[in-house]
Structures are given as C-alpha cells and as structure tokens.
Image: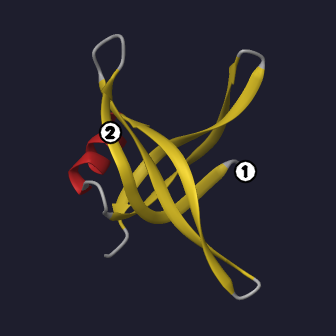
Amino acid sequence: MNNFTFTGQVYNLETKQTKAGKTFCTFNLVAEETYKNETRPIVIKMTAFNQASDAILSFGDGSHIKVSGKLDSREWQGKHYPDFRIIEVEDANS
C-alpha cells in the first residue's frame, strides 16, 4: 500500500499558480517523531492542488491539520523524488 497519513503544523504556506492559471499551495508540514524517548521534529515538504489546496489555505499558516493521500514519485533530470499527493485534509484539533 502506498497510503500515508500525517498530522502536524503548517509552516511556510505559499499560494502559487500553474502555467494554466490554476491555484495550488506549497507548505512544510512539521510532525513529531519519538525515537528512544526523544521527540524530534520531522519537516515534510508538500504540495496540494484543487480541494485539498483550498482546505489548507482556509486553515492557514500555523494550523494543526491531518492530511491523507497516496505516495507517488516524480522524475527530474534522471533522479526520482517522493511526491505526497494529498487527497483529504481535516482539522487535527477536532
């Protein structure tokens, strides 16, 4: 399975436009991981389109959200990079 669910805080939220003029957003989701009784932040760079983008923009920078989606990859100049395709967004405080 290639599904993911992350809960964390939104930072560096930016609105951008595709060449076709559609709005999307990029942001860092800061989650926490506990390893050997030590909690540390994990920063995950994400991009959201369509309804997911609208939802994240409505929550705003600094909000605590839960995102779910599918893990994919993209190729650029012969290298492969992970791509988190966000399908659902919800308030993590509810």
Task: Name the residue rendered at 60%, 55% in the picture.
Answer: 4
Residue 91 place in picture, x, y as percent: 32, 66
- Considering the numbered disc 1 on the image, is that residue within a helix, a strand or a loop? loop
Instruction: Report which quarter residue 53 is drawn in.
Output: top left
For the view shown, which residue lies furthest in the bottom direction? Answer: 37
Task: Name the residue rendered at 31%, 63% in the picture.
Answer: 63
Whole-angstrom CA distance, mark 1 to mark 2, is 30 Å
- Considering the numbered disc 2 on the image, is that residue within a helix, a strand or a loop? strand
**Residue at label 2?**
14
Q: Which mark is residue 85?
A: none
In terms of depth relative to the viewer, which is nearer, 33 or 92? 33
Residue 59 place in picture, x, y as percent: 25, 56
Task: Name the residue rendered at 76%, 24% in the picture.
Answer: 79
Q: Mark 1 and 2 residues: CB-CB less than 8 Å, in contact?
A: no
The first of marks 1 and 2 along the sequence is 1
**Residue at label 1?**
1
